[in-house]
Image: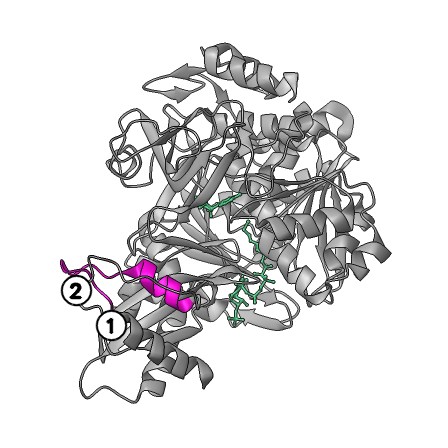
């Protein structure tokens, strides 16, 4: 046990005002906050700041203009680019001038549908500079999902690129943007498109502007000064899967976000000015927002942006090469990435040969880290592999072993201990805490610490309705338990969200899409175990009389989910079954379907309507799996 961790956690809970006021001292405020927290106004009321200024300008002003800010490493385009803080300031300034020329102002929204290129980070920071609110949409989402986000965020401008590069494939973004603009109700004023060498896109006259041309046209414009915004002004909206087909827009506020991220870099990951930090994620996810872009820059460290995959770009040594080449000190990835590497390189040949350079620790999150994966990574690297837990809503880790506070306690299968600022309670259905060792709903005492969301975009009632089902506690949607030693074990979701390769998806949303396919009478989508991706979605469909052939229906259902939700849905398996197992009250027994999909033995639940159905389903699954 680390005294520093215990003390920090106790201080944060007993005296949050003092703890978070002290933490806020590392941020440059234009106006100092009156206090740390106010029930109505949230974190740092009265404070004004600019997040871009804190990430970029102030480091240059402090004489660190020559220090490395961002490394772009892209094995898929065979490119490595390095930007110092002075260069980053110049690049961000140019994009801010471009956006300003289009009339983007404080409070306006800008949607980004961009690949993993430096321009994406420049654009996020440029929005922050102008006090505008960005909303980054992950490239794996289909046009309809992009359209939903456009309609909700109502952006003045949409930023995109001609393509993304997914391993060996080039994904044209422009046709998807065009389709999204047709599907959306809201009229975006302008699209600014970054042409990549790999694939040049056709421009739509009158709507699309070429990034490079706009940059040249505004080259003589002054760099817009950072607009100082209130601490509770939104920095970004990030949409995430809820239990319905409508994504939830998580609102991140400037002040708390800056303080919390800076605190986490120093106290969890052990990263400060001059250190290199790499989060192998995508800017479309919260991990990318917090730890590819904002977090490392807030503390004056070097951020790594990697465009590639853990395997196949070109081999399972690519992550270790990036780590060794750039002197990465702390590394953050999803367990899926480790499993993918392990599958192709079980002996760890690549890591042995390439080494891990200056790496001190590996952090895992986004999905459950199975003990075998952690064990493999620890043996291969000889480094601590630290599982930690958080969510889009929270913005930064809530459960971890605070490595930089000297807490190295770890137990495989557990995500660690509550991070300072977060007070957990595991509650039973009656809302009462359950004894340690017993599983229940994982909740966190409200108000949540800085950095966590306090509202949903365009949905004032949504926060309370969705998350405060237990009065006074935020319901995480995860179930789990504290063991006797205080380790928190995350056992899974209490709703229909699944994590596929660390990507958060809603099976409920997929069910809605599948149910809409002509010829489908009934359906269920569940998350089954997968050796690499952790989980994969599987659809079970019951066909209407007269529907197309089974094979044609399966193909159509899979294509429909890909078309409406996107490639990221990764729905590749669909079984036609004669009936779905249900309770007598008509509820589909999804757990039973999961057991069957996993090939496990099942027990017939007492509540089942027809005990013969599970066997029929299993027989159908086995017959189709063989084909
Ligand atoms: N733009 C367009 N398409 C994308 C995309 C993007 N940004 N990201 C993923 N996709 C596509 C993939 O190409 C794939 O398409 P396919 O079905 O045509 O092959 C599909 O979405 C599913 O992607 P994914 O689940 O990532 O599978 P994969 O086979 O491409 O890669 C791994 C498997 C394990 C290598 C990959 O999932 C991975 O790197 N995982 C790490 C997870 C991670 O970093 N998560 C971040 C959250 S912390
Ligand atoms: P996201 O909002 O995409 O970050 O997904 C958050 C969800 O991912 C959590 O609610 C968990 O269900 C899951 N998750 C994240 N980290 C972990 C972890 N370390 N262990 C188990 N599940 C995790």
The residue under label 1 is: 613
- Does the residue tagged 2 have its C-beta within 8 Å of any atom of ligand 2? no
Can residue 589 be seen at all in this image of the molecule? yes
Q: Does 530 sit above or below residue 488?
A: below
**Side of 118 relative to 469 (left or right):** right
Asked if residue 358 lies in the magenta stretch, the reply is no
Q: Which residue is mark 2?
A: 609
Give the numbered dot on residue 122: none
In this rendered view, identify the residue nearer to me: 16 or 110: 16
Which quadrant would the N terminus be assigned to in this image? top right
Instruction: Give 45 or 178, whichever is nearer the viewer.
Output: 45
Binning the other alpha carbons within 10 Å of mark 1 as few (below 14), some (14 to 19) or many (20 upward) gives: some
Residue drawn at the location 27% of the way across and 88% of the way down: 548
Q: Residue furthest right?
A: 353
User: x, y (%) of residue 524?
Assistant: 29, 66
Q: How far apart are labels 1 and 2 at the CA level?
A: 9 Å
Q: Specify the segment rendered in magenta.
A: 581-597
* Residue plotted at (60% across, 37% down): 411
Residue 266 relative to residue 605: left or right: right
**Residue labelled 1 has its Cβ within 8 Å of some atom of ligand 2:** no
- Kind of element beneath mark 2: loop
In the displayed structure, would residue 563 be above or below residue 435? below
Q: Residues within 10 Å of mark 2 (few under 14, many from 20)?
A: some
Q: Splitting the image into 4 quarters, where does residue 556 fall?
A: bottom left
Q: Residue at x 33, y 56 (%)?
A: 148
Where's the C terminus, which quadrant?
bottom left
């Amino acid at each position: 046990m680390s005294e520093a961790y215990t003390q920090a956690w106790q201080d944060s809970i007993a005296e949050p005002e003092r703890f978070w006021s002290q933490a806020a001292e590392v941020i440059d405020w234009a106006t100092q906050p009156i206090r740390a927290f106010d029930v109505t106004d949230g974190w740092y009321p009265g404070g004004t700041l600019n997040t871009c200024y804190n990430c970029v300008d102030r480091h240059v002003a402090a004489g660190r203009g020559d220090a490395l800010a961002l490394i772009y490493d892209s094995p898929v385009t065979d490119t490595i680019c390095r930007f110092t803080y002075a260069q980053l300031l110049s690049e961000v300034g140019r994009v801010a001038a471009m956006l300003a020329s289009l009339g983007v102002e404080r409070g306006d929204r800008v949607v980004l549908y961009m690949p993993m290129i430096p321009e994406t980070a420049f654009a996020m920071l440029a929005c922050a500079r102008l006090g505008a609110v960005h909303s980054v949409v992950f490239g794996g989402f289909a046009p309809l999902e992009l359209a939903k986000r456009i309609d909700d965020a109502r952006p003045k401008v949409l930023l995109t690129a001609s393509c993304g590069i997914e391993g060996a494939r080039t994904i044209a973004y422009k046709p998807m943007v065009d389709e999204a603009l047709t599907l959306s109700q809201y009229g975006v004023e302008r699209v600014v498109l970054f042409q990549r060498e790999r694939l040049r896109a056709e421009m739509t006259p009158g709507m699309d502007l070429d990034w490079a041309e706009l940059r040249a046209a505004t080259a003589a414009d002054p760099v817009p000064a950072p607009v100082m915004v209130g601490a509770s002004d939104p920095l970004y909206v990030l949409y995430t899967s809820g239990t319905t087909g409508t994504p939830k827009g998580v609102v991140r506020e400037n002040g708390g976000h800056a303080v919390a991220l800076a605190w986490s870099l120093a106290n969890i990951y052990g990263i400060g000015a001059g250190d290199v930090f790499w989060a192998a994620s995508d800017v479309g996810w919260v991990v990318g927002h917090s730890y590819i872009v904002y977090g490392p820059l807030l503390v004056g460290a070097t951020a790594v942006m990697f465009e590639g995959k853990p395997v196949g770009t070109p081999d399972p040594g690519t992550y270790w090469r990036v780590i060794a080449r750039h002197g990465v000190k702390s590394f953050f990835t999803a367990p899926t990435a480790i499993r993918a590497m392990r599958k192709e390189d079980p002996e760890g040949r690549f890591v042995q040969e390439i080494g891990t350079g200056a790496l001190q620790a590996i952090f895992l999150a986004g999905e459950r880290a199975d003990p075998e994966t952690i064990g493999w990574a620890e043996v291969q690297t000889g480094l601590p592999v630290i599982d930690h837990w958080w969510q889009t809503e929270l913005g930064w880790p809530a459960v971890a072993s605070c490595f930089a506070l000297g807490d190295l306690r770890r137990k495989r299968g557990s995500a660690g201990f509550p991070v300072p600022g977060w007070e957990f309670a595991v509650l039973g259905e009656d809302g009462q805490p359950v004894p340690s060792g017993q599983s229940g709903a994982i909740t966190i005492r409200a108000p949540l610490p800085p950095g966590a969301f306090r509202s949903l975009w365009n949905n004032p009632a949504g926060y309370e309705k969705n998350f405060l089902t237990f009065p006074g506690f935020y319901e995480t949607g995860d179930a789990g338990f504290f063991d006797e030693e205080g380790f928190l074990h995350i056992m899974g979701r209490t709703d229909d969200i699944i994590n596929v390769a660390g990507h958060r998806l809603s099976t409920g949303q997929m069910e809605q899409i599948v149910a809409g396919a002509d010829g489908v009478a009934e359906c269920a989508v569940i998350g089954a175990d997968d050796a690499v991706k952790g989980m994969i979605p599987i659809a079970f469909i019951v066909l209407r009389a007269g529907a197309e052939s089974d094979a044609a229906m399966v193909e159509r259902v899979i294509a429909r989910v890909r078309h409406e939700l996107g490639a990221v849905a990764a729905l590749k398996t669909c079984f036609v079954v004669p009936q779905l197992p249900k309770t007598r009250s008509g509820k589909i027994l999804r757990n039973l379907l999961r057991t069957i999909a996993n090939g496990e033995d099942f027990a017939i639940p007492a509540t089942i309507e027809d005990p013969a159905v599970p066997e029929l389903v299993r027989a159908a699954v086995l017959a189709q799996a063989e084909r």
